[in-house]
Amino acid sequence: MVWLAAHIWFLLFIAFGIGLGTGWWIWGARSEQPSQPQNSDTPMGTLDIDYDPAEEQRKT
């Protein structure tokens, strides 16, 4: 009986550790900031489908 209780507690602690580790891993992955594009010619937020960055450079 002691053997069974010891194994139940052991498996309970293992399951708790796996859950805690998985939660920490997921939470840590979400706290990272998304990377910004390095070189972007198109302005963010534009809804102009026909926008051509090369045409904008020719105007200036």
Image (cartoon, rainbow, N blue to C red):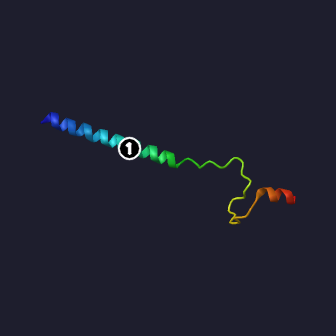
Question: Identity of the amino acid at label 1?
Answer: Leu
| Left or right of residue 55: residue 7 | left
Q: Determine the residue located farthest toward the top in the rendered image.
A: 3
Q: Residue at x 45, y 47 (%)?
A: 26
Rendering coords of residue 48 (x, y %): 71, 66
Q: Residue at x 74, y 62 (%)?
A: 51
Q: Determine the residue located farthest toward the front in the rendered image.
A: 50
Nearest the eye: 25 or 6: 25
Q: Which quadrant of the rendered structure holds the C terminus?
A: bottom right
Q: Which quadrant of the rendered structure holds the N terminus?
A: top left
Nearest the eye: 25 or 55: 55
Nearest the eye: 28 or 35: 35
Q: Determine the residue located farthest toward the left in the rendered image.
A: 1
| Left or right of residue 38: residue 13 | left
Q: Residue at x 65, y 49 (%)?
A: 36
| Placement of 46 over or under 39, stated as above or below | below
Rendering coords of residue 25 (x, y %): 45, 43
| Left or right of residue 35: residue 8 | left
- Sort mark 1 into few (<14), some (14-19) or many (20+) by Cα contacts within 10 Å: few
Label 1: element kind: helix
Rendering coords of residue 29 (x, y %): 50, 46
Q: Determine the residue located farthest toward the right in the rendered image.
A: 60
How many circles with numbers are drawn on the protein?
1
Rendering coords of residue 23 (x, y %): 41, 46
* Res 19 quadrant in image: top left
| Left or right of residue 29: residue 23 | left
Query: What residue would you read off at disc 1?
Result: 20
Nearest the eye: 42 or 15: 42
| Placement of 48 over or under 22, stated as above or below | below
